[in-house]
Amino acid sequence: MTKVGLFLCECGPNIAEAVDLDKVTEVIKGDKKVALIERHRLLCSEDGKKFLAESIKKNGFERIVIAACSPKQHENTFMEVMTRAGLNPYLFQMVNIREQCAWMTPDKELATQKAIRLIRAAINRINYHTPLKQKEIECSPDVLIIGAGITGIETALRTAQKNRNIYIVEKNELGGVLNRLQSLYPGMQSARELLQKKIKEIKSHPEIKVFQKSKIKEILGFFGNFIARIETEDKKEVKLNIGSIILTIGGETFVPAELPNFGYKKFENVFTADEFENSVINKENLPQTIAIVHCVGREKFGYCSKICCANSMKLARLIKEKSKNTKVFQFYKELCLPGKEYDQFYKETKEQGVEFIRYKNIEIGDHKIDYISEDEIKQSLSVDMIILSTGLVPGKDTQYFANLLNIPLDDYGFFKEEHIKLAPVSTITEGISIAGGCQGPQDLNDAVIQAGASAGRTLSSLIPGRRLQVEAKTCEIADSICVGCGVCVRVCTYGALTIDESKHISVVNEVLCRGCGNCAAACPSGAARHRHFTNQEIYQEERAMLK
Amino acid sequence: METKNKDILIIGAGLAGIEASLLCARAGRKVYLLEKEPYFGGSAIKSEEVFPLMECATCMLAPKQSDVLENKNIELLTLSELQEVQGEAGNFTARIKKQARYVSLENCIGCGACFEPCPVEIDNNFEEGLSKRKAIYIACAGALPNAPAIDMNYCLRKKGEDCQACKQSCMFDAILYDDKDREITVNVGAIIVATGFKLGDASQYTNYGYKKFKNVLSAFEFERLRASNGPTTGIIQTKDGSPPDSIALIHCVGRKEKGYCSQVCCLYLTKFAHYAFDKIPGVKVYQFYKELSIPGKENEHFYKEIQKKGINSIRAENIEIIEADSGLQINYQNGNNKNGSIAVDMVVLAPPIEPHPETRNIARILNIELDQFGFLKTQPFNPVESNRAGIYIAGCAREPNFMQEAVVQAQDAAGQALNITED
Amino acid sequence: MQTEPTIIGFLCNWCSYAAADLAGNSKLEVPGNLTTIRVMCSSRVDPVFILNAYFQGADGVLVAGCHPGDCHYQTGNYYARRRLALLIKILQTFDIEPKRLRLSWISASEGQRFSEITQEFAKFIKEAGPNPLKKKPFFE
């Protein structure tokens, strides 16, 4: 029989005064599963840890139960002591008799009974523990970046290091949306100059390999060990081994063809902001009056794109620069100018004679705008040209890559981040990051930061010459029991389970598994096992608690 | 070539500082995480819920905080402030002043037995003065690290009395009256500044009656009223203890004077409306706003959902709050220049997000630039890089931000710090 | 002999277990007859665990997880909710009243709420009397 040591921590008076530890000892002593009961005033202290380590060695304990504070306080502390004492740290169960017993049950008798039940549960379960190992796997530090707009280019530059290859794949020309822009707000720098400089940098970078006009055909594998198949410009196939993937495929500007009240493609001289900045502004002499209409498409797709207000002001300034006497009107609903730079930008734009008109409803006609103002008055304005400031929407390839990589989209069709606040550039699949316009509507600053963030996550997790650490408390599948029904595959959020078609059973990818145990609860045949929280371990806890 | 120091110093242990530390530590780097308060977690831990999904803030942050505390690569230095920095990227030397906590982090087990006997009672700043604390205190239930500090500004011993109340109640020898301020010197290769923000003082905009009328609250006061671990365990009430029948949320307080939009207020006020509807059945909620700024996916959906519950939105200028017989009265001029007036029981103000008062000092020590508003200045096309190589800025130290922006900036800064310290 | 009812609580590691710790930290009262089992996620709670608890004589079972939308593993609590909804139908065939099973969402900051919910549930279970399976043993 394995030798189990039980340690009771008094936690000074905290446990000792609220729980009758003598009685606990007396009751548990009769349990044959426990070899010895030790007691200490404060087990987490240096003296206590020494006592624990020495007692393990002296008594030859093989498994340990410690009744003390919450595992959230000192589980790791004691696991370290065990490791140093030569025991597998998972042959250990901590019993929370402080927070969830001594401190919440003022009646000493009840608290003592509760402590006994909790300790018995741990003693019952401990013999079912198996030693778990922190595994390590080989991995590639190389990175595949999909999409070479400014976000992708920046990501490549930030990720590139000695001993790490960066592959950047773009289906068109390099540069993405920046190719279509004149200048950048609020600094009004040239977009082209910035882009040319960055393209030169990636092309000459020794660690970055650029694939233009190339397609991603297939991606297999998982964090640390992906394989991507690429069709290059000259129709050759290239296979890449990479450790992580960053999606920077960008978004698109909305085309308002289906919104009849904006008169797009119906009346001449109605352009989208993108068309205007990309070509119209270069071609002709600008007319006498131009109206810029904000929030085009916002109601349809259901969010504010953040960039349009400031971008419309930028267009007004470009117009003024080129044709000083052109009268510019901004038709807006709400001015969205978040951050420290834009109130000033707005003020300066206004000072250039740009007129701002708030609308509630708008109907664009032939060279005119009919609108209803906020106080419900119908008005009309004749203009020579109308620019529709359209919002940002997901790009057409978003769905393709979501399918290819098996990652979800959000309600709006952008890639869904792992957590909207805490992990905005991660996806639920470890090793696949997202940055820029494919993650959500954002301005250049945001995109550059997200590029840096996805680079930062990669630099921190995949290090040349280092192996990947894998979580120990993952799930496993018993081959002989699994019937390959696929229920576990469907409930796993992280894509950690797949069906091995040749064996007709489910297999766990321990790199992707985060150990929630959902599959173990879902498995109808009991083949899925959640390490450290197995059915047996929990039944044993229940049995002891209800005895 | 001289080898670069691989260690990283991070100033400020709020959301951004925590995220940056975890990333650098994961890469195997030693991280010194500096926090001037006795607890860490920054402003984010004051929230009950986080928009737009109304997730529990503690549930989001506590696991990250435990990761920091358990990570062997991260040395969290609470009650610590930067004194001096010399050197350059790859080889900085930083002098840090670590204030005495007067409580041993090694010995203290966080039982809280010392609070009760302490005879001194003062306002708890963390709770915006809505509750009292002792001279030996933790900021709020659940604050980490789980150990109190003695505030020597108020401790009777500072006044020469030989009070031993806390020491006598402590069973773990954790009280150290002779603890001293210490000076620590660390060598690092890169520095990340994440000192965060401070909410502007609304009383300087006198028309809102803040500090003059008792039921005019600033945003964090309202947030703490709703906090389950706050002074009222989450019950929203006026100063006389009754639930308000009507609440007015005032946007853009001080925006014109400051010259920028603080970005987060429209949405957190929407969250406050949600709190009110959630906790006070039948409450009337008004919002007085100038321009609605709710950028980004998910946010508009959230805004509209809360609007459906019946917020009365009024576009208003020239707001003046006065005390009336029935409570507070808000006089305003609406979007069509008509005058109006509404009576409410409680007013919640959204003052500007300002750089933390320490920012100026940090900028001086690090020799990095500030912008016209006092935020730390960053580079065009590299919005987290300061004007000095090897020094990066993340979170509200550089600009008012959403939480997700603070996180990505921290990840960006961490990446650049890792990169610049590679040989 | 009339004994105190026994209640088993399954708490998810990230929200509800933390809330229970916070309740203890704040010295809020929680019924002594509630004994808790820590799981990583409420989705780990196999309905069989709950059936097993009743068969072993538990008078009530509490499953507590993160609030909807807050799950540390994205959607685990939704799975728990669906599984328990189905389980309730099965419990009725054993004459176990559905209200003996409580599913609650308790976040990490809600120590107070943890205390309130558990006290209220314990009171309910006490009034409801012993688990009917105890009176007519299942396999006899």
Image (spheres, coloured by chain):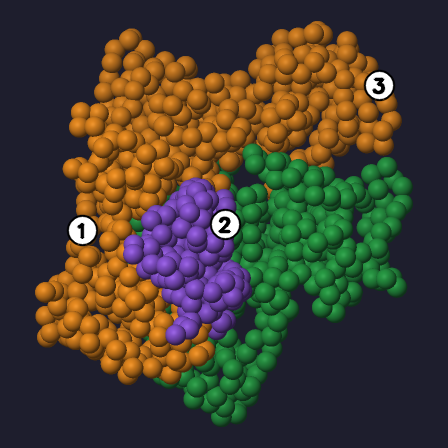
Chain colours: A orange, B green, C purple
Q: Which residue is mark 3?
A: A380
A59 left or right, relative to B51: left
Q: Which residue is mark 2?
A: C67
The residue closer to the viewer here, A341 or A63, is A63
The amino acid type found where label 1 is placed reads Lys
Q: Position of residue A521 (x, y in %)?
A: 33, 44
Residue A494 in the image: above or below residue A237: below
Q: Is residue B109 visible?
A: no
The residue closer to the viewer here, A210 or A412, is A412
The tag earlier along the polypeptide, 1 or 3, is 1
On-image quarter of the N terminus of chain A: bottom left
Q: Residue at x 62, y 71 (%)?
A: B131
Q: Nearer the viewer, mark 1 or mark 3?
A: 1
Q: Can you tell which mark lies on residue A133? A: 1
**Which chain is mark 3 on?**
A
On-image quarter of the C terminus of chain A: bottom left
**Residue at the limit of the structure toward the bottom, as seen here:** B162
